[in-house]
Amino acid sequence: MWNWEFAAEALPILLRGFVNTLIATVVGTVIAAILGLILAVAIRGLPRWINWLVRLLVAFIRNTPLVVQLLFVYYAFADIPGLVNVPALVIGFIVIGIHYSTYMSESYRAGIDSVPPGQFEAATALSLPPVRTFTAIVLPQALRATIPSLGNYAVAMFKDTPFLFAISVVELVTAAKEFGGSTFAYTEAFTLAGIIFLVASYPTSLLIQRLDRRLATY
Amino acid sequence: MPPTENTPDTPSSSATPSGPNTSASATPAIEFKDVEKSFGPTTVLKNLNFTVAPGERVTLIGPSGSGKTTILRLVMTLEELTGGYIFVDGEPLTFEERDGKRVELPKKRTREMTTRIGMVFQQFNLFPNMTVLENIIEAPVHVLGTSKDEAVKEAKALLAKVGLSDKADAHPTRLSGGQQQRVAIARALAMSPEILLLDEVTSALDPELVGDVLGVLRDIAETTDITMLLVTHEMQFARDVSHRVMMFDGGQVLEEGPPDQIFNNPSHERTKSFLSSVL
Ligand SMILES: Nc1ncnc2c1ncn2[C@@H]1O[C@H](COP(=O)(O)OP(=O)(O)O)[C@@H](O)[C@H]1O
Ligand SMILES: [Mg+2]
C-alpha cells in the first residue's frame, strides 16, 4: 500500500541523490560535447596512424558497456597512487562524458558533412582563412543539424546515470534503493524516483523538439 | 534579340565597351601558361595559354563540358592546377618555377593572391547562417582587416548599388534567387577585387529575374575597370559588355576575337553551330 509518510520522508533524500544525477549529466554533457567536437574535427587532420588509433579507441568505447568502463576506470584509478582520492562522481562524469563523446563526434561529423561544398567554395572565393571558415560558416551550419541529436544524447546520458551505482555514487536510483532497503517502502521510493526522472527529462525532450523546429528555419 | 534576354535596361547595341589596356607592355591581369588540368585520368585542359589584360572583359563561350567552368575555378583556386602556371598581375597564383622546378606556393601566399579575385557562382552560395549585411562584411572585416563600421558603411553603399538597401538585415533564404545573386555580387565587390569571375550567374534564375542581375553587371562593367572573366549563355549581354569572346572546344581555344567578329562572322564551323544552338 502507498504510504504518504514514507513518500514525504523519501523525497528530500531522493532529491539529494538527484543532485548527483544532475551533476553527472550536465558535466558529462559538457565533456561529451567538447570532446566530441574535438574528435570530429581532429580525426580529419591527424596523421594516419594516430587517426587509426583514435578510431580503434572509439570503436572500443562504443562496443563495450558503460558499466564495464566505469568499473574499469574506477578500479584502475584506485591502483594509481595519486588518483586514489578522486571522488567517484568525478570519475563518473568523466567516463560518461568520454563514452558519449564517441557518439556525439559522429553527430558532429554528419553535421559538418551536411554543409554544402558551395559554402566552402564561397569561403575560398572570399579568401577566408580556414579557422574563420570553420568557426563562422561551417560550425554554425553544422550545429543546426547536430544540436537536436546532441540533446537526445544528453537525455540518454541522463537515463544512464543509474549505472553510477556500480562505482558507489549515490545518485537518484541508488538513493531510492537505499531508502527502500532501510524502510521497505520500495514502492514509494521508486515511484518517486521515476516521477523525478520524468519531470526532468520530458520537458527537456520537448525543448529539444522545439529547438529542432526553430533551427530548421533561419 | 535572343528570346532568353529580357532586360528592361538593355542599352543600345552601339554600347561598344571602351578599350582595356591591351598594350603589349602592360602586365596581364591574368595569364595562363602551359596550363594543364586533369581530374584523375581525364585531361580537361592541356597546354592552355592565354592572357587577359587589366580592365578587359572576356567572355568564354563553348559547348557544355568544354572546360569553361574549370578555367574560372582554377583562377579562384577551387581546383588544383595539375600542370603549368597561372599568374595574376604577373605574380604566381598557386605554383611557381624555382630552380627549374614547379613548386607549390604556401597556402597563405595563395590566399593573399586570391584577395584580388572575386567570384560569383551559379548557385549564389550565400552563407545562410548570416544576414545579408553579415555576408557582405564578413571578408572585408576578417580578411582585409577593415573596421566593422567602415565595412558596414561600404556594404550599405553596395546594397544600394544592387538595389537591395531594404534587405540588409534579411536572411538570404528569405530572398528570391535574383535578390540572392545580387547580394552575392555585392559580397564579391566588397573585397574591391581587381578581377571578377562570373560563372553562368543567371542560369539558376527564373527568366523574369535575369534582367535585374544583368542590369547590375552592366552597371559594374560601365562604372568600374574591374577585369572580368565570364561564362554566360546570355549572348546579347556578352556582346554588349565584353571586349573579347573566346570560343572553347574540348579545352582548347577554337577562336577568339571582338564580340562582333565572333558572333557575326565566326570562322569555325563549330562556332557557328554552337552559336545557332544557343541563340
Ligand atoms: N570534379 C570533376 N571531376 C571529374 N571531371 C570533372 C570535374 N569537373 C569537371 N569535370 C569534367 O571536366 C570537363 C569540363 O567541365 P567544365 O569545366 O565544367 O565545362 P563547362 O563549364 O564548359 O561546361 C567536363 O568533361 C567535366 O565532366
Ligand atoms: Mg560550366
Image: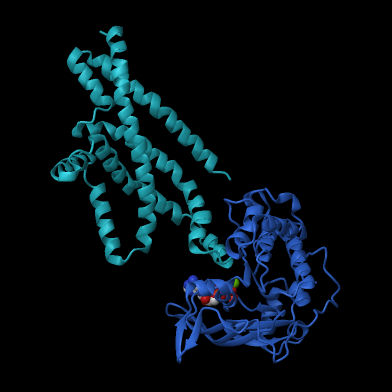
Residue shown at 27%/28% (left/top)? Answer: A171
Is A130 left or right of A100, judged from the image as shown? right
Is A34 left or right of B172, judged from the image as shown? left
Q: Nearer the viewer, residue A198 or B187?
A: B187
Residue shown at 26%/47% (left/top)? Answer: A62
Residue shown at 54%/66% (left/top)? Answer: A124
Quadrant of the picture in which ligand 2 is shown:
bottom right
Residue B87 at what x, y percent from top left? Answer: 58, 83
Q: How many marks?
A: 0
Please determine whether, in this image, residue B236 is positioned above or below residue B271.
above
For the C terminus of chain B, the image quarter is bottom right
Q: How is the image coloured?
A: by chain
Residue A146 at what x, y percent from top left? Answer: 44, 46
Q: Is residue B246 visible?
A: yes
Is A47 left or right of B94, judged from the image as shown? left
Residue A103 at what x, y percent from top left? Answer: 33, 47
Residue B14 at what x, y percent from top left? Answer: 86, 78
For the N terminus of chain B, the image quarter is bottom right
Is A74 left or right of B5, judged from the image as shown? left
Q: Nearer the viewer, residue B13 or A47?
A: A47
Please determine whether, in this image, residue A84 is positioned above or below residue A19.
below
Please determine whether, in this image, residue A194 is positioned above or below residue B243.
above
Q: Is residue A3 visible?
A: no
Residue shown at 76%/63% (left/top)? Answer: B211
* Residue sitting farthest toward the left: A79
Please determine whether, in this image, residue A167 is positioned above or below residue A187.
below
Q: Would you identify the image quadrant in which residue A217 lies? A: top right
Q: Chain A's shade in the image?
A: cyan
Q: Would you identify the image quadrant in which residue B15 lies? A: bottom right
Q: Chain B's shade in the image?
A: blue
Q: Would you identify the image quadrant in which residue B118 lies? A: bottom right
